[in-house]
Image (spheres, helix red, strand yellow):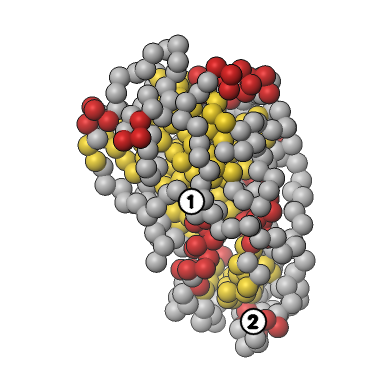
Amino acid sequence: MVVSAKQSRSPLAPRTSARGRAAYRWAAGILVVFGTPLCSCLGPYAPPDHGPARPGKDAQPSAEDGGSEVLDIGSAAIPDTPPADEGPTPADLGGPAGFCHGEPHVARKDGKLLPVQVTTSQLVMGCCEGIIVRLHDPALPGSLVSLMVSWAALSAPAGPHDLSGITAQIEVSAGDGTFAHQPVMQGTLTLSDSYPPLGPDPLYVEICAEILGDPLPGSITRLWLPTQVIPWSWAARFGIWPLADPDLSAEEADRLPLTDLPLAIDPLFDLMGVAWYDQTTTTFHLDPWRSWVTTRLPEVGFYGLPLVLVVDGERLGLIALHSQLSSYAFPGTTVWLEALAPGVLPLTPGPSALAHDRQLLTLLRSAAKLVGPLP
């Protein structure tokens, strides 16, 4: 990269039956574990059909705006470990009025409750299927903990699955994205439908779990994570696009009607390439399989490289990829070359409200890819 002179929640079963556990083990008995970074076994990216796919409804996620206030939930809300023959279920961990209920939260080793926000992604690997579930404290940058659940089989059936029976298939990392720790858990992972989601609506996921042995990073000992994973049909609902004409500068594009700018064939990344968007820092964090785009951008001229942000087929605004060494000041949202890092695209809003556009944030929230409150 150079600068020269010349981008309605489905009801989920609360208890694990022996039949459900047996069905899961039969369908996914050859699950495997990956102790290496995600990108080590990725194949080439094959973008989905970018037709005007829209979901049947804009499903709203379970997570609401939450702060980082630490609350004492007391011993009554987190009962003793349930009998080993049954394994803990949402009811065992507190029931409708107890721990596995309400908005996403975790418990620390000291018994304190921490509200969290949750973002998710589908695994993009040639070897298996699975999901990434990330826990965020809205008051802190990055993610507290990431869980990777993977299946070597083509799909996992709907229903509750006993986490104690699939311990070897769950890996945990801190915020650095390297999956190395395999926790010992008991509890349930519940899917509202078979995975991967193939229809127009998100797949709802609930994780109600207790950590046995060493706690997770952050001294986390219990998890209640109701969330969702979007299908590939949502990919084209968002994109940051370069223009078809690579010689058109951001300064020139800004003087033309936004609807008159021809876009390139493919976006820099679409919704499936987003790990999460931090609304407070106005920064896109990309999934590992798509993180290379921030280091292989086209040549950026003195007057900036124009990019167009598109949500649900509507062009919301122009973004200029620009260098701080240039004396030209783009009047709208800017991405500074000097601030780029692999997998990170920070937006500098300037006088533009594009980075806080409610249509953008609402979509990201419904896709379980937003950290921070809606404005």
Q: Is residue 19 left or right of residue 12?
A: right
Q: Is residue 195 visible?
A: yes
Q: CA distance from mark 2 to mark 1?
A: 31 Å
Image quarter where the N terminus lies is bottom right
Q: Which residue is mark 2?
A: 258
In primary-sequence order, the first of circles 2 and 1 is 1
Would you identify the image quadrant in which residue 322 lies?
bottom right
At 66% across and 60% down in the image, what residue appears? 54
Residue 226 is situated, as x and y percent measured from the top left of the image, at 46, 41
Element type where label 1 sits in the image: loop
At 50% across and 40% down in the image, what residue appears? 11
The foreground one among 214 and 337 is: 214
Residue 159 is situated, as x and y percent measured from the top left of the image, at 57, 31
Would you identify the image quadrant in which residue 305 lies?
bottom right
At 62% across and 51% down in the image, what residue appears? 201
Q: Which mark is residue 61?
A: 1
At 35% across and 30% down in the image, what residue appears? 95
Would you identify the image quadrant in which residue 238 lies?
bottom right
Q: Residues within 10 Å of mark 1 (few under 14, many from 20)?
A: many
| Mark in front: 2 vs 1 | 1
